Amino acid sequence: MRKELIFFFIVFVGIFFFSREVLAQEVHCSFSSPVPLNGRTTAHCQAIAKHFCLIGKKIEKVDLFYDDPLGVASFMQTFDCNRSSCEFDLPSERLDKVGRWNIMACVKETCSFLAGSWTKCVNVGWVDVLPPRCGDGVINQPGEECDDGNNISGDGCDANCRLEGAPPGPTQPTQPTGYDNPLLWADIPQFLLYALRFIFNLLLGISILMIVVAGIFLAASRGDPIRQAKGKRTLMFAAIGLSIALLAQGLFMLFRIIFGVRF
């Protein structure tokens, strides 16, 4: 009795998984919806080969049928896959009828092990097409001269979707005037700021170099008082230079605040 129960259990599990493979939906799609009349939508689809097959299971192609609100298949799109699992994006043609468009996907699978093929069609979604209006981003009304996707005037297309004067272009920046030099300083405060920043960078570099040299003198002095004196003197000069650099940086920041000069 126990063997019969185990046998029926294995058969039941096999039928469950086999039926799930055969009957499951092979393709899932998502669509941008709603869209305006004569707008476009993009179908993002994922197709997976589901039929039972040991070797060579793949999807050859996927056909998408768009049925308009009257039930007429208005157009079809095809994607070739040749893999067991694939994802793809398909932009639709223009949707020219208001209402709900149903989308049907027909998946063709093949199995080289069984030398067979299957085609299964499933409903994968719909797209709602809205009535035309000014501001929907599509010129879809007789009175529209333009449609930029909003109802704001002053941007070349007014609130009633009529063309208007072109918006003013960006103003050209004024060319700096003043000194005849490659940096084209605009005025004296800007020249002083450039000079202070140059002094700061120069003294900062020299101070760091002198600190390194002083460290070398002190490390290699081996108790020699002359070398130690040189190292201390170099370190003192480095400290003075660093102080001047910090002062120049402070003056630089002060001038920027006072004169409002930006770099």
Image: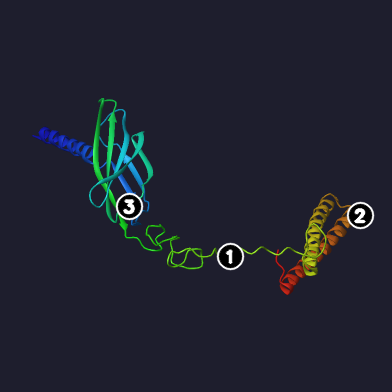
In contact (CB < 8 Å): disc 2 and disc 3: no
Q: Secondary structure at mark 2?
A: helix
Relative to 221, 148 lies left or right:
left
Tell me where residue 195 appears, x and y as whole percent.
81, 63
Q: Residue at the location (33% across, 50% down)?
A: 30
> Mark 3: which amino acid?
Asp
Q: Nearer the viewer, residue 78 or 227?
A: 78
> Pointer 2: residues within 10 angstroms few (<14), some, or many (20+)?
few
> Pointer 3: residues within 10 angstroms few (<14), some, or many (20+)?
some
The coloring applied to the image is rainbow
Does any portion of residue 242 appear in the rendered image? Answer: no
Q: CA distance from mark 2 to mark 1?
A: 74 Å
> Pointer 1: residues within 10 angstroms few (<14), some, or many (20+)?
few
Eye-nearest disc, 2 or 3: 3
> Mark 1: which amino acid?
Pro
Q: Which mark is residue 226?
A: 2
Label 1, on which residue? Answer: 168
Q: Nearer the viewer, residue 176 or 16?
A: 176
Relative to 262, 77 lies left or right:
left
Against 223, is 17 above or below? above
Q: Secondary structure at mark 1?
A: loop
